[in-house]
Amino acid sequence: MTPVNPIAQDFDVLIVGSGLAGLSAALHLAPTHRVAVLTKRAMSDGSSGWAQGGIAAVMGEGDTFDSHVDDTLVAGAGLSDPQATRFVVEHAPESIEWLRQLGVPFSQEDGHLHLTREGGHSARRIVHVTDATGAAVQRTMIEQVRKTPNITILEHHTLVDLITGKKFGSRSASGGLPVDRCLGLYALDERTDEVVTFTAPHTILATGGAGKVYLYTTNPDTATGDGIAAAWRAGCRVTNMEFIQFHPTCLYHPHVKSFLITEAVRGEGGQLKLPDGTRFMPAHDARAELAPRDIVARAIDFEMKKHGLDCVYLDISHQPAAFILEHFPNVHARCLELGIDITKEPIPVVPAAHYTCGGIHTDLLGRTDLTGLHAIGETAYTGLHGANRLASNSLVECMVFARSAAHDILDTPLPPPPLVPAWDESRVTDADESVVISHNWDELRRFMWDYVGIVRTNKRLERAQHRIRLLQEEIQEFYGAFHVTRDLLELRNLVTVAELIVKSAQARHESRGLHFSRDYPAAAPDPQPTVLTPPGLGD
């Protein structure tokens, strides 16, 4: 065994990720616990700040919890967990009030919160900050975290792996299944190029989703599935990884990275059209542009392939210019920079990978299969989203489960700090070339887009699986021989996530929600979540 590390950094709680979920948990825990927030880039570089639409909560007159629950269950296509759904919906309003107390400047109208409506919702219940809700919430949260005692911020720290009790042979029985314990983690400090050991009785994964496994995505570069992959390697189950949400309306432009055009544009009357101006959504669904995202994304994909198009168009120019500038100032400004005036002309759009509906299997307290390890936010599977996420249910899920996980930790006595092995680099060298990483990264994202995208077949999934196996062999050989880098760690995680997505897709012999298979176009009568169990769990 590698010698025990005498200089491991010890905390009460380690939180990996600096989005809304991670920072919310940190603020709930900080009054009584020593918290470290690790993030692999800057604090503001996660997905939360990119969320434009808003936060769903029952706040308006005439709206009800039952209505929000029903809308979520309908969007989830029979796979949303009713208990988890009601848990989130009923705790959503208090989360909004908490954010208001922190100082988030939500949009107002006549002295009240302005509520907008998005696809799949039967009422106006989207609380927002114009069209940049995520950025405003994230900015407020970061300000609060930076001035809160007991929170240590560690930027440019990339998760390498979780440290588990299994390394020492420590196992206990719970519910008839062997349960391991998480004792901390290893993280690459990019400032020193060293792998640092962190210990804590509680670790929270809030690392976001895995959109970067696809060629086209609305996600930032940080969305590489780090938490999902690390938890899987450590022995945690993952669930429903086949359900990758493709946002229907991502700006199509050759000179910029994918820029999301908020759902609220359609909620406020935006129409999807072909290049000749023909509106096509009414032919695909009675709800037209307000249908759930999976239906809209497949309709766009169908029309693009049918007509040989590079994109379709989202048109809100029939609304008054003042209305557009008031409701969508950021979308208007960004498009105008690219020569598109949305008050006068339509926006070219394409679908793009947007949200990971599955993830690390958790309960209502955010607990995973590993004692001492919680997962919250997009990296977790809570049962809320089912086969498709209802618009604006993600940010509220972050807050509700951050609070419940924090309360679970606060109710658990703190054991003494563990002794863990130091990171061993004695048998590795510096890589002589990095082209292997960049080439494999590009190959992975392209075949995932081609074979495991909006529409799937058995043959496409088999082709993807074959290529994943080849990449895994190359990457593992590289990982074992050379010093780790952030690019290598992210590629290793993305290949693991790709494998989980393909395995989950192959296990679902039906079409449901975000998973559409040409080989199994009908829905099964009794749908069940797809639960994958790591090798060795339960042995």
Image: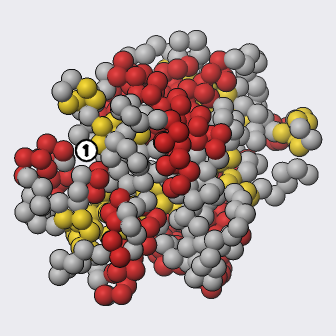
x and y percentages locating residue 427 in the rendered image: 69, 54
Residue 271 x/y as whole percent: 24, 65
Q: Position of residue 356 (x, y in %)?
A: 52, 55
- In the displayed structure image, the side of residue 444 where residue 8 appears, left or right: right
Number of callouts in the render? 1
Horizontal side of 25 relative to 112 (left or right) equals right
Residue displayed at 48% across by 79% down: 450
Residue 488, by quadrant, is: bottom right
For the residue carrying disc 1, how many other residues have a C-alpha within 10 Å: few (<14), some (14-19), or many (20+)? Answer: many
- The image quadrant of residue 456 is bottom right
| 435 over 336 or under it: above or below | below
Q: Amino acid at mark 1?
A: Asp
Q: How is the image coloured?
A: secondary structure
Looking at the rendering, in which quadrant would you find the N terminus? top right
Q: Is residue 351 shown to the viewer in this render? A: yes
Residue depicted at 52% across the width and 29% down the height: 91
**Residue of label 1:** 131
Camera-side residue: 42 or 287? Answer: 287
Q: Secondary structure at mark 1?
A: loop
At a point 48% along the width and 60% down the height, the residue shown is 245
The one of 185 and 47 positioned closer to us in this rendering: 47
Q: Is residue 426 visible?
A: no
Seen in the picture, residue 153 relative to 434 is either above or below; the reply is: above
> Which residue is at 29% across, 80% downward?
310
Residue 430 picture quarter: bottom right
**Vertical comparison of 5 with 248: above or below:** above
Across and down, in percent, residue 124 comes to 34, 42
